[in-house]
Image (cartoon, coloured by chain):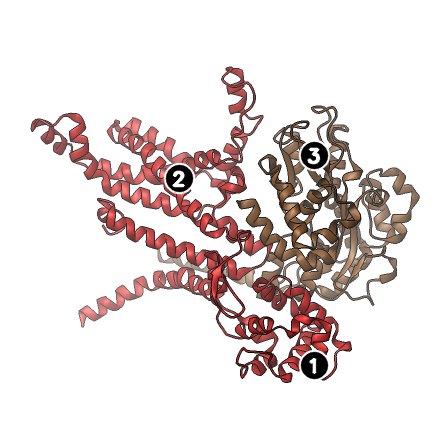
Amino acid sequence: MAISRNNLLAAALIAPLFAVVVASFIVPLAVTLWTAIGNPEVRETLPRTTAALRGWNGEGLPSEAAFAAVAAELAQAHEAQAIGQLSRRLNFEEAGLRALLLKTARAKDRLSAPYRDALVALDPRWGETSLWQILARNTAALTPLYLLRSLDLSLTPDGKIVAAPADEAIFLALFARTFVISFWVTILCVLIGYPVAYTLSTLSTRWANIGMALVLVPFWTSILVRTTAWFILLQREGPVNALLLGLGVVDAPITMIFTRFAVYIAMVHVLLPFVVLPLYSVMKGINPAYLRAAASLGAPPWKRFIRVYLPLTMPGVAAGGLMVFMLAVGFYITPVLVGGPEDQMVSYFIAFFTNQTINWGMAAALACLLLAMTAILVVVARLIVPGFRLGGVSA
Amino acid sequence: MQSKLASTLFAVAAAVATAVSGAAVARDLMIVGFGGGFQDNARKHLFQAYDKASGVKVKDDVYNGEMAKIYSMVKAGDVTWDVVMVEAPELVRGCEDGVFEKMDWSVVKKDKFIPGGTSACGAGAVLWGMSLFYDQTKIKNGPTTYAELWDVNKFPGKRSFRSTPKGTLEIALLADGVPAAEVYKVLATPAGQQRAFAKLDKIKPHIVWWKSGTQPVQLVGSGEVAYAVGFTGRTVRANAENGDKYPLLWKTLLYSVDYWAVVKGSPNAKEGFKMIDWITDAKPLLALAEDWAVSPANKEAAANPKIAVKNPGMLSSHVADGLFIDTEFWVQHGEDLEAKFNAWVAK
């Protein structure tokens, strides 16, 4: 009785947290995944065409009923201001279909039975099997196309998966770039943060507090402000170039802004506290007696570091490194402000598809793939990196 | 402790209640434009003047033309913008997508607009344009045509273009020697599109892309880039503030029309149409022209000889030199070219 009451109480205490996790994490994730594979446009805008195409075997041309339905429904959709989503969706399958659908919708008054002849006379593309194959394929509730495009693949009208045309195949390179930038930012953060955390952990309380404040004040400053500061520092007529010119190091201002270099410098600066703080807390907890023991057994300093201190701090390295990597993978504003077009990461394209072209299927597909790839990388890292299992992940 | 908790809860509940009831009360008419000098002056002569004349409370806000916000509003059924200024192809696409109301021509008088000044969902607001400029205090003799702009040896330094295919691809073809009248015929073919991208490839490392209309003047002003193609309104305003630093090269003008449209499902749609009719009348536009080099899409205002003399930067005086950005072309090809353009930029 007492146990079940306690259990109930415990459940009640975590219920709000559970609700928050469901509402803020699981639901958006499910919606995003659904957006990446959902395919409502043809079914909703052309229901009668969808029904008429159900019996078609995909060869030759469909029945007169399908032609009549598509002619009537396109005109209706145009009248009801609903043709945009449909034509955008089909244009994404094959460039030029938007124009064809609008032309057909506008020609409503000139079309009459038999509709097959009328539509083919209006535009010969209506007489092509491939167009009808595309239409029929998209009467399905789900589509793999957004995910395929995000992996530089495409579908032929008869449903074969092929490589996307070279002038549109950018996403694999984009994912690779995102992970390479995140990897190097993580390495740099650990290399710079490790000695900083070590020094802080050896200082007296008073100096350690001052040092900590130097780490924390930037940490509490908005990312936007810090990134903008780098923009000002690195620009062509900014202080860094003025200094270099004044010292005679360079003859002409060097280009630092809108380069990969600027992205690295600003991202490392923004993310450094995330590796310093966990490292510091781990280092503070290391018993100095272990190092003294190693010294008394005759280990030289480098060996004490490699064999004793470094393994003991690995949980901090793993936790900090993982946090930096995860945050870096999703970075958006810093590369946008200080990077060039060749330095943009996946988030930039998610924002581009969301805001500019309103292709939310592509945005969702890229987001889902980014999440999946990051999860796989973390699992792999847990298997191969020493000390990772002790890190913030499982300890 | 208990009473403190209770009072906190009460305060939260009260705040929520106010927020909820506040949302239910009719809000002010919200008009949204692209900002800049036009909007700063339109606030007084168009928006607040209408507020005074009609008694309808008007507020204004700024966006960069990104349509996603409008689409989400309409989709979510929570429309907080009533009247928006939109570029032509976005207007036509948005109209087909049902995110703008069909224009109520029984309220807005259709015959007062210049040719091309009306669309199914939009009433013409102003002409806008982009042209090449640079800082004359730093560069004595800059390029005067797009063909010259491609000569990076003769004219060193970065160039800045708007990060959209619309405008940029036209410029590339003009630079490659395509006559203005042929630009869209060439750009409609795959070979023509390749030609435009190949031309851009030649100066790609020298390009800095801009997104917001304030950037071109900032980039040229700070020396970050040597040349930029930016909105003429911003250049005119920068010249007014800093002394004529930037030449207006009308031969490099690309121009189009911005429209007023009412967002679909706006609770103030009726008021929105009335306001659009008022702010596209000649009288308030001529008042606006006193302070700002506006190029109205109203026939009577555009033909007024006084404002053409007063505002040498008025676009309607220079359209003969420029290239009209073809709305129908960008409605048809916009999505394909945006995808290609972005893939090209990122490579």
What residue did someone put label 1 on? A115
Letter of the chain that mark 2 sits on in the rendering? A
Local crowd size for mark 2, using a 10 Å CA cut-off: few (<14), some (14–19), many (≥20): many
Q: Residues within 10 Å of mark 3 (few under 14, many from 20)?
A: some
Q: Position of residue B83 (x, y in %)?
A: 71, 58
Question: SS of the residue at dot 1?
Answer: helix
Please determine if labels 3 and 2 lie on a single subunit. no
Measure the C-alpha gap from mark 1 to mark 3: 53 Å
Left or right for A214, reference B161: left
Q: What element carries label 2?
A: helix
Could you say whether the residue bearing mark 3 is in a helix, strand or loop?
helix
Same chain? Circles 1 and 2? yes
Residue found 66% across the figure and 67% down from its top: B98
**Mark 1 near mark 3, Cβ–Cβ under 8 Å?**
no
Q: How far apart are marks 1 and 2 (CA)?
A: 63 Å
CA separation, marks 3 and 2?
Answer: 40 Å
Q: From this viewpoint, is residue B62 visible?
A: no
Is residue A279 something that shows in the picture? yes
Tag 2 residue: A271
Front-lying residue, B212 or B18: B212
Chain A: drawing colour: red
Of all chains in the rendering, the one displayed in brown is B
Along the viewing direction, whichever of A315 and A86 lies nearer the viewer: A86
Residue flagged by tag 1: what amino acid is it? Tyr
Q: Residue furthest left?
A: A297
Residue position marked by numbered label 3 in the rendering: B149
